[in-house]
Amino acid sequence: MNTHELAPKKSLGQHFLHDQNVIQRIADGITAGIEDPARDVLFEIGPGTGALTSELLERGFRVHAFEIDQRMIAHLEGTLQKQYPELVLHHADFLRLKSEEILGDSVSESADRINLHLVGNLPYYATSQILFKVLELRFRLTSATFMIQKEVAERIVASPRTKEYGILSVQTQLMSRPVILFDVKPGSFTPPPKVMSSVIQLTFNHPPLSCSDATLKTIVRTAFQQRRKKLSNALKTLISPTEFPAFDFTLRPEAWEPRMYERMAEAYEQNVKSSSNRM
C-alpha cells in the first residue's frame, strides 16, 4: 500500500503520530508499574499506521486494535500482524460496539488473572463520546491512556469553581483518577492539528458509586445545562430544594465538588424510592 493510499482522512479526524520520542513516553506511561506484560491486555482505539501498536507489541503486550478505516486494517495485516501474529485486529467503530464485543475473549479466558487497559490517539470530534463509553466499562478495566485535545484534558482534571469544570470533570473524577502525563505539540503528528494535545491517564481504582450511573448523569447534566444559574433554578425540573435541606442550592453548579453530586444523586434516589413506597 503506497503513501497516498495511507493519507490521513479528514472525515475520520486522523492525525498520525510520528514522533518516536512521544511514542516512547506514551508507552512508558502505560507500562509504569506493570511487572509482567503477559498478564495485561491492551485495547487500542484507532491504531492508524501502527506506530504506538508496534512499540506496545515490542514490549510484550497482547494488543487488540479497533480500527474503523479498512485501509489501516489492510496495512496492519500486511505489516505488524505478520511480525506479531498475536496482534488481534478488529475492523469496527468502537463507539458502536457493545461492551461484550469490545472485551470479548480477552476477559473470558481468565478475567480474574489479567489486567485490561485501553489506549489510543482519539479523534478530537469523538473524544467525549469515547470517554463516556470508557467510563461505562470501568469495572472491567485497570487504566485508560489517551492522546486527546489539551483543552479537553484540562476540563477532565479541572477543579471546582473554574470555568473548565463541568460535566466531564465531575463524572470522570468520580469514576476514575485522571492525571495529565504530558503535552504534545502539533508537529508530532501528520498532518499537524491546529491545537495542542495532551496524554491523559485514567486509573480505575475507585469503589462503586453510592448511586446509579444513570441518576448521577441526570443530576450532573441537568445542573450544568444552566451553569450560570443557582442550583435551585438549574435543578428545579428534578428536585425541590426543601426536600433536601442538607444541600446548599444557592450555589452555582461549578461550586459543588464531584462528591457532592454523588451525594445528591444518592439522596435523590432515596427520595424517589420513599415516595414510591408511600404510594
Image (spheres, rainbow, N blue to C red):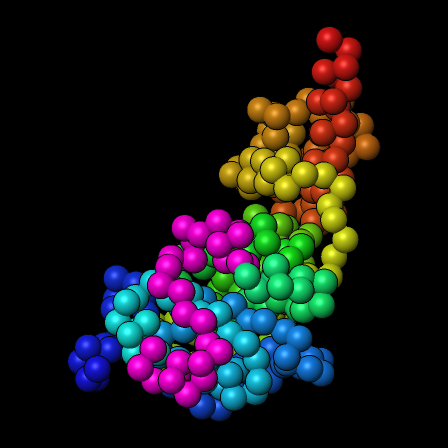
Q: Quadrant of residue 196?
A: bottom left
Q: Nearer the viewer, residue 193 or 36?
A: 36
Seen at 35% across and 63% down, the residue is: 91
Q: Residue at x 51, y 83 (%)?
A: 57
- Given residues 216 and 254, the one toward you in this image is 216
Examine the rendering and report whether any part of residue 5 can be seen.
Answer: yes
Q: List the single residue furthest toward the front.
A: 109
Quadrant for the N terminus, please. bottom left
- Residues in magenta? 77-104
* Quarter of the rendering occupied by the C terminus: top right
- The residue at 71%/29% (across/down) is 268
Is residue 79 shown left or right of residue 240? left
How far from the left and from the top, in percent, is residue 120?
Answer: 48, 70
The residue drawn where x is 80% and y is 28% is 245
For this rendering, which residue is in front, 239 or 94?
Answer: 94
Q: Position of residue 61 (x, y in %)?
A: 57, 80
Q: Quadrant of residue 180?
A: bottom right
Whether residue 245 appears in magenta in the rendering, the answer is no
Q: Decide if residue 235 is on the left or right side of residue 133.
A: right
Q: Which residue lies furthest to the bottom in this view?
A: 21
Q: Name above or below for residue 269 compared with residue 183.
A: above
Residue 80 on the magenta span = yes
Left or right relative to 78: residue 247: right
